Image: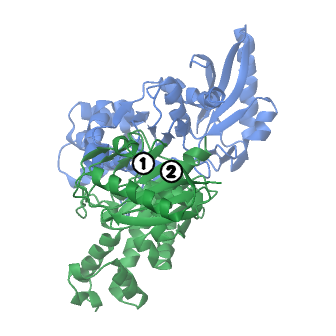
Chain colours: A green, B blue
Amino acid sequence: MSIKVVLGIDIGGTNTVFGLIDKEGKDYLVDSIPTNGNLPPDDLFKRLFIRIDELIRQAEIDFEIMGIGIGAPNANYFKKTIEYPPNLSWGYVELEEFIRKFYTQPFAVTNDANAAALGEMHYGVAKGLKDFIVITLGTGLGSGIVVNGNLVYGHDGFAGEIGHTVVFPDGRECGCGKKGCLETYVSASGIKRTVFELLSRYNYDSRFRRLSFEEFDAKMITQAALEGDKIALKAFDFTAKVLGMKLADAVAHTSPEAIILFGGLANAGELITTPTKKYMEEYLFHVFKNKVKILKSELNEGKSAVLGAAALIWHELLNK
Amino acid sequence: MSIKVVLGIDIGGTNTVFGLIDKEGKDYLVDSIPTNGNLPPDDLFKRLFIRIDELIRQAEIDFEIMGIGIGAPNANYFKKTIEYPPNLSWGYVELEEFIRKFYTQPFAVTNDANAAALGEMHYGVAKGLKDFIVITLGTGLGSGIVVNGNLVYGHDGFAGEIGHTVVFPDGRECGCGKKGCLETYVSASGIKRTVFELLSRYNYDSRFRRLSFEEFDAKMITQAALEGDKIALKAFDFTAKVLGMKLADAVAHTSPEAIILFGGLANAGELITTPTKKYMEEYLFHVFKNKVKILKSELNEGKSAVLGAAALIWHELLNK
């Protein structure tokens, strides 16, 4: 008997990860290839689909591919497009053409944070929840909002960009062209900027006084905080304060049962979750106080994006 | 033949307005009685239902009441409760008991801003829209968020409190106990506070220099702005800037097609809609720019709350 699976694909700036995922979230043949974002998208999809074919043949398992789910930056669910993704020289890409050369099954695409939200709903800590928000803390800050059991795509398919809400109207320059966006404070690069700001404000000794901006990363800030570096500790406190404040705003919009932190900075665990919860409670409107959980994703980081991409199709198949 | 109608009830701090609304939004027997919020809720509902009975008998029209829709402050859709409404001494009210003494039909309750959103969807400028936000600008700022054709109630039934998102973390004291909430800037009372702040900052002559805080209202600020009073004009500009900024945040959450301004300050028309749109565009994340309309509600203000309350039941009956 064949195993029914969805082909999940996560297109990243450097690598594209893919795998076959069954309804229960069991994964098969997870692998990755370089994205080569400087070449046209045709190149990636050709290599990708040929590689999957090879892997399936070698595995000698009879898979039935029910559909293809894709997570990609700047992806539009309604139009099935990827639009001017940062770090890839693709411009405006209609996916139909590339998929249909190899597959006739249904396919769907959304951005990586939305895919992560679906992954959490079907296979992660959001199982059974109908109203929640996933915040992905990578180089930037992505978000996927689920309302009443469905992802919010919005009128144009681009809903869920909490990373680009405004914290300080004349604050830090954001890669998006605006100023003071949440992701300039709360993200791997945001917390680095905070360390530098704190070094300028305080006189505490810190290991970061001996490093240039390009010599350290968010992981080193986590390590330093765990070892009691005052600047690193203050950086986490400030990051949590800003995140808590903006999560309180997000709660005022859709009143979720839980907010799930995923990736990068979320790996700092209680260093980020505990103060974020504390500050969120401070800023919450009274009717929402003591109701909203802050959880850390428990999905395997290497596979979660592929799980989420596959969930995009499983979610549709199971809700028919 | 009987006319199928829903009994719409809008419970306000001073008066409770009610009426019978048919599927197309035609209203019958709209009337109001004092809420008498210092007495127990039993008193209001008894007077209300007796009065409706009288009116129906006098009208000599054969109405079939399909259900009862109620808009009220701090109302919870899931629990069918009104919880510690400001300006009413009711505490925690379970509505079932009061309704069931008179009616066996389905009933539903939500807050006034959510009801306004349903009213706009069924009978107003949001007809045909699936993703939009209604902002009610009264003494405070209420909001109702519609995603994919349904009101967002959230996990606890209290979603849509954009008025209590934070503009300035250490800003103006809000009635809710927090600081810097949107409604302390953008509302009838918010713009009055802004006039006072501007009088302290600038030396322009203004009619408001000759009035105490309690001697003027938002309507007078609108009138003064139309007549060129510099402080009033600046007050509208600042109000629109804050509103535009927070609407850009709201768009980043649910990506609506339109945002509809309703009541009080919205009656200032282009004085508020034009600069709000301009500032919102400035703060919007690039994928949302030039996509979101700012509209003014066109519903009759005296009847809109009752229309919205009735739409709560019609929405459920028509979506079955």
In the image, taking residue A73 as reference, residue B315 lies left or right, namely right
Residue under the point 54% across and 64% down:
A27
In the image, taking residue A242 as reference, residue B52 lies left or right, namely right
Badge count: 2
Mark 1–mark 2 CB contact (< 8 Å): yes
Give the structural element (helix, strand or loop) at label 1: strand
Residue under the point 32% across and 49% down:
B245
- Residue A111 is at least partly visible in this image: yes
Residue A113 point in image, percent of width and height: 43, 57
In the image, taking residue A6 as reference, residue A183 lies left or right, namely left
Residue A91 point in image, percent of width and height: 24, 48
Q: Quadrant of residue B87?
A: top right
Residue B86 point in image, percent of width and height: 58, 48
Per the image, the residue denoted by label 1 is: A109
Q: Quadrant of residue A86?
A: bottom left
Amino acid beneath label 2: Leu
State the CA–CA distance, disc 1 to disc 2: 8 Å
| Residue sitting farthest toward the right | B101
Instruction: Indicate the chain on which mark 1 is placed.
Output: A
Same chain assignment for discs 1 and 2:
yes
Instruction: Indicate the chain on which mark 2 is placed.
Output: A
Q: Earlier in the sequence, mark 1 or mark 2?
A: 1
Q: Quadrant of the N terminus of chain A?
A: bottom right
Q: Residues within 10 Å of mark 1 (few under 14, many from 20)?
A: many
In the image, taking residue B7 as reference, residue A33 lies left or right, namely left
Give the structural element (helix, strand or loop) at label 2: helix
Residue under the point 57% across and 26% down:
B307
Amino acid beneath label 1: Val
Per the image, the residue denoted by label 2 is: A312
Front-lying residue, A290 or A184: A184
B25 over A61 or under it: above or below: above
- Residue B40 is at least partly visible in this image: no
